[in-house]
Amino acid sequence: MKQIEVKVDFRQNASRLELLIRLPYLLVYSLLLYVIGVIVSVLVFAHALIILIRGKRVNFLFLVYQKFLILRTRFDAYLHLLTDSRPSITGVLRKKSFKQ
């Protein structure tokens, strides 16, 4: 079984400027995550059909869903003021990170 590990570092000092930037950033990021979430949901449904028909999982579809969960978790940590570090879409969704 593959595991996903999430770490959020605690820092007592918080940036006031980051808090002001956070609001417009969250609006744009939320819309983008919504679109990605819809696409991933379709892929999860397709993956369920593939498992039902073939009896095997597809590694690429598993990795896509895994990357989405990591991205969503990082976004939620930023949204709920647990961290000041903005989540990076490009860092999670790099093409070579889908190869294992």
Image (spheres, helix red, strand yellow):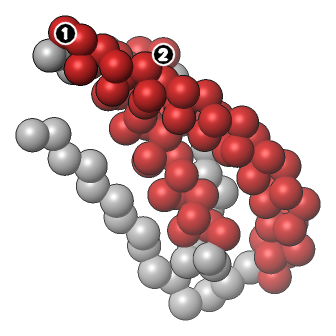
**In the rendered image of this protein, does residue 36 appear above or below residue 9?**
above
Relative image position of residue 64 (x, y in whole percent): 43, 27
**Quadrant placement of the N terminus:** top left
**Quadrant placement of the C terminus:** top left
Q: Is residue 84 visible?
A: no
Q: Which residue is at a point 44% across and 28% down the rendered structure image?
A: 45
Residue linked to disc 2: 95
Amino acid type assigned to the residue bearing label 2 in the image: Lys
Relative image position of residue 36 (x, y in whole percent): 64, 34
Q: Which residue is at a point 43% across and 30% down the rendered structure image?
A: 44
- Point out which mark residue 54 bears: 1
Relative image position of residue 82 (x, y in whole percent): 55, 77
Q: Is residue 28 visible?
A: yes
Relative image position of residue 56 (x, y in whole percent): 16, 16
Amino acid type assigned to the residue bearing label 1 in the image: Arg
Furthest residue toward front = 53
Q: State how many labels appear.
A: 2
Q: Nearer the viewer, residue 7 or 52?
A: 52
**In the rendered image of this protein, does residue 96 appear above or below residue 21?**
above
